[in-house]
Image (cartoon, rainbow, N blue to C red):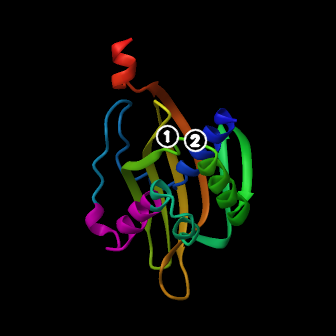
Amino acid sequence: MKAVGFVLVALAGVMLGAGCSNDRPQPEAGSHAVPDHSKLSADLEPFLTSYFATWSKGDMEGYRAHFHPDATIYLSEDGRVLMALKRDPFVDSQVAARASSDDPGVEVMTSFTADEDRYAATANVQWELTHDEEVAVGVDRFTLFRDEQWSWKILSLVYYVTGRSRVATPDRARR
C-alpha cells in the first residue's frame, strides 16, 4: 500500500506545464536555467508556490482550489500516460494517499519557467518530493488560465518523475 501511496503522492507533485518557448535559450543537461521572471505577472510565482505549499501542509481543500473544476491531471512515464483523472477524483486520491502514509511527504518547487499572455500561461516547474526516506525529483507542466475573478486556475497538469534517491537519516547512518 505504501508503494501505491507514494505513486499517488508523487503524482500529485508533478503538475506544472509546458512553458519554454523555442526563442528562449534551453539549459544544457545538468545546468539550471535562470529565467527572467520580471516579465511575468506578479501573482504567477506565488500561485505556483502556494500550490506546492497547500499540498505539503495537507490543506487539500486549499490544494483543490488551485484547479479549475474541469481540470485534468496526467501522470506520464516513458512516453505513456499512466493516469488521467479529473480534479475531484485526483485530489480525493491525494487525500487517501496522505491519510494512509506515516510520512505523507513534502514537495517543493525548485525552479520554474513560464510563458503567459493576458489570459493564460504555461509553466514548467521542477520539483523535489521528500517522502519515506526517498527524494523524488520531477516536472509539472501546467496550463493555467485566469478565471472570472482574475485568479490563476490549473486547467491541465502533466507530471512525471525524472529521478529518485535515498535520504540519509540519522537512523540509517548508525547502521
Residue at mark 1: 138
Secondary structure, mark 2, is strand
- Image: magenta residue range: 37-53
Mark 2 Cα shell of 10 Å, populated few (<14), some (14-19), many (≥20): many
Q: In the rendered structure, which amino acid carries the disc numbered 1?
A: Gly
> Mostly what secondary structure, the magenta segment?
helix
- Earlier along the polypeptide chain: callout 2 or callout 1? 1
Indicate which disc residue 160 carries: 2
**Residue 87 lies in quadrant:** bottom right
Q: In the rendered structure, which amino acid carries the disc numbered 2?
A: Tyr
**x then y, percent, for residue 112:** 38, 52
Residue 69 in magenta?
no
Residue 114 visible to an observer of this rendering: yes
Tell me: 88 left or right of 156: right
**x then y, percent, for residue 154:** 56, 67
**x then y, percent, for residue 47:** 42, 68
Do the residues bearing badges 2 and 1 touch, measured as CB atoms within 8 Å?
A: yes
Q: What distance separates the C-alpha of mark 2 from that of mark 1?
A: 6 Å
Residue drawn 64% across and 35% down? 2
Residue 17 visible to an observer of this rendering: no
**Which quarter of the image is occupied by the C terminus?**
top left
Indicate which disc residue 10 carries: none
**x then y, percent, for residue 34:** 27, 49
